[in-house]
Image (cartoon, helix red, strand yellow):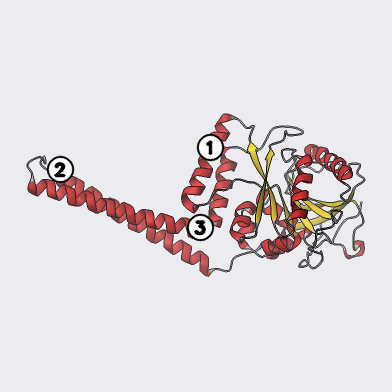
Amino acid sequence: MSTVAAVVMPPTGGDDNLHAAKYPIAIVIPIHNDWVCAKHLIVALDQVLSQAGQVCHVVLVDDGSTYRPAFSPSVSWIKSIRIIRLAVNLGHQRAISVGLTVAADLNVGSVVVMDGDGEDRPDDLIRLLAERIAAPDAIICAQRTRRSEAIRFRIFYRFYKSIFWLLTGTRIDFGNFMVIPIRAVRTLLRTPAAWNHLAAAVMRSRIRLIRVPTYRGTRYDGASRMNFEALVLHGMSAISVYADVAFLRILLGTFAFIALNVIVIAIAIAIRLLTSYATPGWATTVVGSSVNLSMESLVFAGLALGLLLQGRSNKAATPLQESPQFIEEIEFVTGQCPDINSGACIAP
């Protein structure tokens, strides 16, 4: 299979009116070596879509998989399946952004994002689409009300959500499983934050958001690849979307800490001068330690301010700009390549 350059043009097609329930949708699914699960998911989606009478296109984003097995699921209601081969492993969130860039150029009314392992249940997709028809301008996301991971993972996940709330003042209670109207997709593709963390970018976009309670499904095959290190990186990516808000809160916390040190210094001096309770050297130690802590806090705040201002002065990358350069090729599993003679894709 030859390596070809794929050029993705800015999205132009797609009617944003979804009052007609049968309007085609696109489903973006990031995959990294999870092809067994992906095949099970495609078959399950086709069955669910057939029951609902809903047709769709599927965009599988191969996020730098180390092997490429034969992939030919039997489907009837899925109009096309294309695999976007990435030249490098970008990570889950950026792979989704590339998939959204490709899906936005299809003639669809909305784009669905879901994981490819089965934990985002196909049965819940119909519920999300029903909400989408009732609220055509809103992003419909799946809010998991019950998780089934190991207790250690759940503890760290709650810790991550607490840190996120502390730094941003916002609670993040949903993941990547969502239905996005095509107009909102185009907005997100021009939003730099979407390149790092889709859910956090959706929250900051101020697009109307509707949450639908769901349960976490069971993986079709193998074990989850989300470990502690991946969770930390995922959390840092989410917080980076709120970097300005997090910095402001840290700055206010720094000033509060300095004010507390000033109070401690005043109390230490008062005890030293006005009472006989202070032991020799005690007041000097307390005052010196408080001054040092205050100065270190100021230095930390100054460095954080410099980094924030430098980042804001640089031109931020958007998914629409960055995605095309990472696409190695587009392989059509089913469906017709729109321009097989251009060399931009590979037909079945």
Q: Give the label on residue 40, or none.
A: none
Residue at label 2?
Answer: 282
Q: Position of residue 255 (x, y in %)?
A: 33, 57
What is the CA distance from the residue labelled 3 to the residue labelled 2?
40 Å
Q: Nearer the viewer, mark 1 or mark 2?
A: 1
Q: Position of residue 34 (x, y in %)?
A: 75, 40
- The secondary element bearing badge 3 is classed as helix
Q: Give the label on residue 243, or none.
A: 3
Quadrant of the rendered image containing residue 99: bottom right
Q: Position of residue 331 (x, y in %)?
A: 85, 53
Question: Please, what is the three-letter code of the amino acid marked with disc 3?
Answer: Ala
In the image, is 6 to the left or to the right of 269? right
- The secondary element bearing badge 2 is classed as helix
Q: Position of residue 298 (x, y in %)?
A: 33, 58
Q: Which of these two is toward me, 203 or 134?
A: 134
Residue at label 1?
Answer: 156
**Mark 3 and mark 2 residues within 8 Å of each other at the beta carbon:** no
